[in-house]
Image (tube, grey):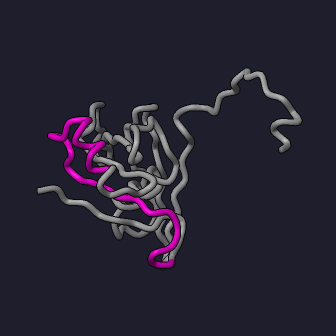
Amino acid sequence: MLTYYIYDVFTDTPYAGNPLAVVEAADDLSTAQMQAIAREFNLSETIFITAPQGPVAEGETRVAVRIFTPEHEMPFAGHPTVGCAVHLAGDVKGAQVITLEEVAGPTPVQVTREGGDVRAEFVAPISPGVRDLPLDRDEIAQ
């Protein structure tokens, strides 16, 4: 049996914000199974937590994750990164760093909990790229 949680990311209002499914202990799931589960949830993204692949320093919270939409896997996405890190941080007060080993690369996320406020900050593991595409200015304007 899998343990999963549904979160509303980027809001403090239930059933608002950006929904996210977090599936714990997904080590034994195949890619096809993860995709099927994400399709079943039918949320914008589902994140699966597995054991870390890299070394874990003493006191470090580090996990590997995979992110799926209902249609495909993504190497990185912001709202699953934030939601998963906040999930893993639990109710710990103050600041802590949670490292998510994403397909795009390791992503340290600083989660800060002060009173009822929770914040998460990270630097994306990949820089946005520029594509050289032949685009028609008038067509785009329409």
The image shows residue 102 at horizontal and vertical percentages of 40, 37
Residue found 30% across the figure and 42% down from its top: 35
Viewer-proximal residue among 36 and 4: 36
The image shows residue 44 at horizontal and vertical percentages of 45, 54
Residue found 37% across the figure and 37% down from its top: 101
The image shows residue 106 at horizontal and vertical percentages of 43, 35
**Is residue 100 a member of the stretch shown in magenta?**
no
Image position of 37 with respect to 30: above or below: below
Using the rendered image of the protein, determine whether residue 99 is visible from the camera's viewpoint: no
Image position of 48 with respect to 89: above or below: above
The quadrant in which the C terminus is found is top right
**Is 70 on the left-hand or right-hand side of 29?**
right
Viewer-proximal residue among 77 and 142: 142
The stretch in magenta equals 13-38
The quadrant in which the N terminus is found is bottom left
Using the rendered image of the protein, determine whether residue 32 is visible from the camera's viewpoint: yes
Residue found 70% across the figure and 27% down from its top: 130
Locate residue 73: give its quadrant. top left
The image shows residue 12 at horizontal and vertical percentages of 51, 76
**Is 13 on the left-hand or right-hand side of 53?**
right
Viewer-proximal residue among 136 and 119: 136
Locate residue 51: give its quadrant. top left
Residue found 32% across the figure and 50% down from its top: 38
